[in-house]
């Protein structure tokens, strides 16, 4: 219920942690406006407003488009089957029941 109430208050009333500086906070607030007609990226200049936001100043958009950017995360892998950077979960028990509601009979 607390999360629901925070959502109703909107992003304008949200307190960001100190680690989030003003520029990314501004971008997040402008992307998350309650009214879609006021959101960054949905205004007259469209996606260009997002690309020109000062937090993204100097970002290599052409490199992104060409898929030529290197990852900012540098992790050493022991091989193609190295899953050490993923969370571990216990194996699922049992078999899920068949879905027999019939929602897809005319699909």
Image (cartoon, grey):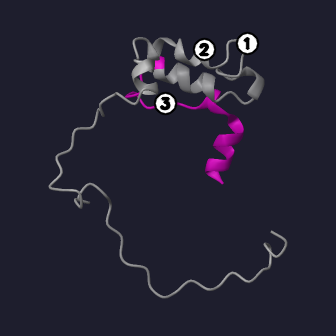
Which residue is more in the foreground, 47 or 31? Answer: 47
User: Mark 2 Cα within 10 Å, few/some/many (few <14, many 20+)?
Assistant: some
Which residue is more in the foreground, 21 or 94? Answer: 94
Name the quarter where the C terminus is drawn. Answer: bottom right
Q: Residue furthest right?
A: 106
Which mark, residue 49?
A: 2
User: Mark 3 Cα within 10 Å, few/some/many (few <14, many 20+)?
Assistant: few
- Given this view, does label 1 or label 3 mark the residue nearer the observer? 1
Residue 11 part of the magenta-drawn span: yes
Mark 3 / mark 2, whichever is N-terminal: 3
**Residue in view at x 37 percent, y 28 percent:** 19
Which mark, residue 44?
A: 1
State the SS at label 2: helix
Which residue corresponds to mark 3?
Answer: 16
User: Mark 1 Cα within 10 Å, few/some/many (few <14, many 20+)?
Assistant: few
Range covered by the magenta-colored residues: 1-23
Residue 41 part of the magenta-drawn span: no
Residue 87: % across, % down: 32, 61
**Residue in view at x 42 percent, y 26 percent:** 66
* Circles 1, 3 touching at the beta carbon (< 8 Å): no
- Given this view, does label 3 or label 2 mark the residue nearer the observer? 2
Which residue is more in the foreground, 13 or 75? Answer: 75
State the SS at label 1: loop
Residue 27: % across, % down: 54, 21
């Amino acid at each position: 219920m607390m999360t629901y109430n925070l959502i109703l208050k909107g992003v304008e009333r949200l307190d960001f942690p100190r680690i989030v500086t003003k520029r990314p906070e501004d971008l997040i607030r402008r992307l998350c406006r309650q009214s879609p007609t006021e959101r960054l990226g949905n205004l007259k200049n469209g996606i260009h407003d997002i690309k020109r936001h000062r937090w993204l100043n100097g970002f290599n958009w052409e490199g992104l488009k060409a898929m030529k950017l290197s990852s900012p995360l540098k992790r050493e892998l022991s091989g193609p089957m190295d899953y050490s950077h993923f969370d571990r979960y216990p194996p699922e028990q049992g078999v899920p029941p068949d879905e027999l509601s019939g929602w897809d009979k005319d699909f």
